[in-house]
């Protein structure tokens, strides 16, 4: 299936040899990653709790105009200019003190192997002299810092004269400050921030490398239900707004303020979204569907940016299918009810990679997603890990063990799909006509 694009074995190990000389970087460990499961683990709240600022805004909105969509709820909770989860400086989002950690926080190997992927694509494109690196939702800047370090080292080893530009899509001033602090150590690197991917113009004169890691799962989504009449939308109402409640599947816990309701008839938006993919036609009556038009639009823009020369990786929770009830909220590294403490929890939903592929494939080749375990191991995780551990086995065996445990956690798998290696999917995009995943037969 995958033929054509590959570095030679000699080139691959020449690259790896330089990369392997990089010392290990401390990472967080022994923390649960953002795990989606069929059961919602929710602590029972006090009967009366002080509402959050976002909760108050949402209640007033529902009282004034009626039920709101899940997309509106999510946008308020995460992106409200002053009280949103990602926008408020007082919210500790990442790390051991926050609500979750991500793969780059666990092991430096993650970013290093992604950089190898990008460099292999760049080399097969003729090694253009200007590289534009774009990251959507860069978090604290850890992943970008790891990628930049490797790309800088290896292009020097290749004696390539390369100019690197960095573009970060981030609309939170608090997050931008974190990214500036982390990436400011990269020397005279010029960083451009963008509130939206739409402000980054396509360019045929430079080679674009685009990374979207745990970005799409945080985008607003709508919830639909298929009936004999067509697609209805599931909205969110409040206990102060007179509507009959709609039982939500797989949820036995209900917070008093918000609950889902069904529109009495199909709406223009529910009809449009329900027919936005031919795959949705096979969904049986009575089923629910989570669908994000924002994700589709951004994926289409990614195709436009990379079409004239570039490659990209989308890594996220989800798979090559649609989902009906994957939405979750995270607080203090635990799954809580989706309506728990609005504005103070991270909200996510599994990513329908087939939907993203449909948005991109009009512009350029997109390949079927791989599991994170398959991708990282094929990219050389074992070789890199052995080198990192080699210098510590004698002097510091405990450190060598921690390095090994952290890296192996990235590729761990389980029969129920609950480990990082098989819960994350990786989708490669490339303007090259050959295969998108190097080193994979």
Image (cartoon, rainbow, N blue to C red):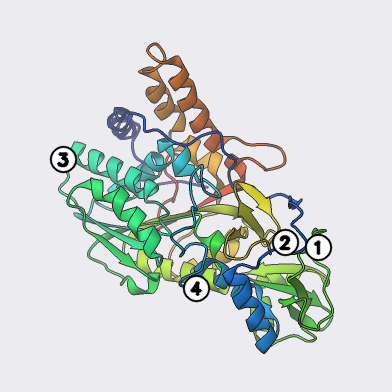
Residue 381: numbered disc: none
Say whether residue 350 is left or right of residue 316.
right
Image quarter of residue 170? bottom left
Q: Is residue 435 left or right of residue 133?
A: right
Residue tagged by mark 2? 325
Viewer-side label of 4, 1: 1
- The foreground one among 432 and 52 is 52
Tag 1 near tag 3, CB within 8 Å:
no
Q: CA distance from mark 4 to mark 3?
A: 39 Å
Q: CA distance from mark 2 to mark 4?
A: 22 Å
Residue at 70 percent across and 81 percent down: it is 67
How far, Cα to Cα, is label 3 from label 2? 51 Å
Q: Is residue 88 above or below residue 383?
A: below
Q: Is residue 424 above or below residue 325?
A: above
Q: Residue at x 40, y 15 (%)?
A: 396
Q: Earlier in the sequence, mark 3 or mark 2?
A: 3
Would you say residue 398 is visible in this rendering? yes
Q: Of callouts 1 and 3, which one flags the residue occurring earlier in the amino acid sequence?
A: 3
Q: Upstream in the sequence, badge 4 or badge 3?
A: 3
Find residue 249 and name its label.
1
Q: In terms of sequence position, does the residue under pointer 2 or pointer 4 come before the other?
A: 4
Secondary structure of the residue carrying tag 3 is loop
Residue under the image location 29 percent in, 46 percent down = 148
Q: Position of residue 370 (x, y in %)?
A: 55, 47
Residue 197 left/right relative to 64? left
Mark 2, secondary structure of its residue: loop
Choose between 37 and 66: the one closer to the eye.
66
The answer to whether mark 1 and mark 2 are in CB contact below 8 A is yes
- Residue that badge 4 annotates: 297
């Amino acid at each position: 299936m995958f033929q054509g694009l590959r570095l030679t074995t000699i080139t691959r190990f020449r690259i790896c040899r330089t990369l392997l000389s990089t010392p290990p970087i401390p990472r967080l460990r022994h923390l649960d990653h953002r795990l989606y499961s069929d059961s919602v683990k929710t602590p029972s709240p006090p009967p009366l709790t002080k509402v959050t600022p976002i909760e108050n805004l949402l209640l007033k909105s529902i009282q004034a105009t009626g039920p709101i969509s899940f997309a509106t709820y999510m946008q308020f909770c995460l992106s409200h200019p002053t009280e949103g989860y990602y926008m408020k400086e007082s919210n500790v989002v990442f790390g051991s003190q926050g609500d979750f950690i991500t793969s780059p926080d666990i092991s430096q190997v993650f970013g290093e192997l992604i950089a190898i992927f990008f460099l292999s694509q760049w080399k097969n494109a003729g090694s253009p002299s200007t590289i534009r690196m774009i990251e959507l939702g860069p978090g604290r800047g850890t992943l970008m810092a790891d990628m930049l370090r490797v790309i800088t080292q290896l292009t020097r080893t290749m004696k390539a004269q390369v100019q690197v530009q960095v573009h970060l899509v981030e609309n939170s001033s608090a997050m931008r400050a974190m990214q500036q602090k982390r990436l400011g150590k990269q020397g005279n690197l010029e960083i451009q921030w963008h509130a939206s991917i739409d402000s980054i113009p396509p360019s045929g004169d430079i080679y674009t490398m685009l990374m979207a890691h745990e970005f799409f799962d945080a985008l607003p989504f709508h919830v639909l239900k298929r009936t004999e009449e067509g697609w209805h939308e599931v909205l969110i109402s409040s206990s102060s707004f007179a509507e009959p409640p709609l039982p939500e599947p797989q949820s036995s816990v209900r917070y008093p303020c918000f609950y889902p309701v069904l529109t009495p008839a199909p709406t223009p938006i529910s009809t449009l979204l329900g027919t936005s993919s031919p795959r949705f036609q096979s969904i049986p009556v009575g089923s629910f569907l989570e669908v994000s038009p924002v994700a589709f639009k951004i994926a289409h823009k990614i195709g436009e940016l990379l079409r004239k020369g570039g490659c990209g990786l989308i890594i996220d929770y989800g798979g090559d299918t649609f989902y009906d009830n994957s939405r979750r909220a995270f607080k203090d590294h635990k799954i809580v009810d989706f309506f728990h403490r609005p504005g103070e929890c991270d909200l996510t939903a599994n990513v329908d990679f087939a939907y993203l592929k449909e948005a991109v494939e009009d512009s350029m080749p997109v390949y079927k997603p791989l599991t994170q375990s398959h991708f990282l191991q094929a990219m050389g995780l074992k070789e890199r890990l052995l080198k990192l551990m080699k210098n510590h086995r004698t002097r510091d065996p405990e450190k060598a063990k921690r390095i090994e445990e952290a890296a192996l956690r990235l590729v761990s798998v389980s029969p129920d799909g609950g480990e990082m290696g098989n819960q994350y999917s990786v989708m490669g995009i490339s303007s090259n006509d050959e295969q998108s995943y190097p080193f994979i037969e």
